[in-house]
Amino acid sequence: MDELFTAANTPWFLGTAVLVLLLGWYLYRRNRGGSRLKRILGEISHDRIDGLLIPNGDDGEIQIDHLLLTSQGLLIVDIKDATGTVFGSDKMQEWTVISKERRFTFSNPQAALYDRIAAVRHIVRQVPVAGRILFLDGAEFTKGVPSLVSDLDQLLGEFGEADKSAAKFKIEAFKPHWDLIRKAALGTQVDQMYSHRKK
């Protein structure tokens, strides 16, 4: 009787064990990627605003997910969490992601990023403003990487500053323009902005 009970429950037990292992692996990978993202954004930015809504210059508004104050100027970061092979280029209207599980397409995100860059430049005209579409670990461009696309290592290499005293000097020069962005934020959102200011 015990052998029958054990044999009947073995597939259920194995299925549950596999499910728990897969869930644990997923959570580990997700948290590891998130902490690495947080660490690198913290390394390259002196201050950061998430969920910023500003005028777009055409009687409308535009949302910026992440705006960073760096030693290179202001940096807009759009994050894409896609796993698989990404087929996209500067001129393609739609990009495609192919993974083992699925295939999907989305509009070329660079056009929207150019609009965000233009909106920020409309407010701060004398400060360098850049934008990057950040693909997290798990995305691979096999046919070339579009011009505004970056991964975490490239972002750190491009916007990181080894000389901290030089970085501090540059940041101070950009501060008045950063304050203009804060003042331009629409409505009550200024009070809700999540800021990551370094002391």
Image (cartoon, grey):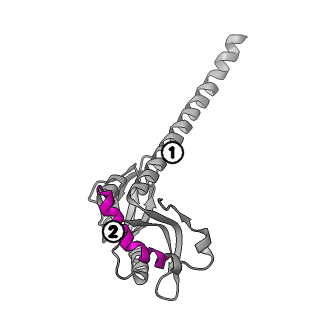
Give the percent coordinates (x, y) of residue 185: 54, 77
In terms of secondary structure, what is the magenta stretch mainly? Answer: helix
Q: What is the C-alpha distance between the residues marked 2 and 1?
A: 33 Å
Residue 2, relative to residue 174: is it above or below?
Answer: above
- Disc 1: which residue: 31
Q: Nearer the viewer's eye, disc 2 or disc 1?
A: 2
Q: Residue at x 51, y 75 (%)?
A: 182
- Residue 164 versus residue 142: which sits nearer the camera? 164
Q: Residue at x 47, y 59 (%)?
A: 198
- Disc 2: which residue: 170
Residue furthest bottom in the image: 59
Q: Is residue 105 visible?
A: no
Residue furthest right in the image: 1
Give the percent coordinates (x, y) of residue 33: 45, 47
- Residue 19 versus residue 113: which sits nearer the camera? 113
Q: Is residue 171 magenta?
A: yes
Residue 116, relative to residue 24: is it above or below?
Answer: below
Q: Mark 2: which amino acid?
A: Lys
Q: Residue at x 61, y 69 (%)?
A: 192
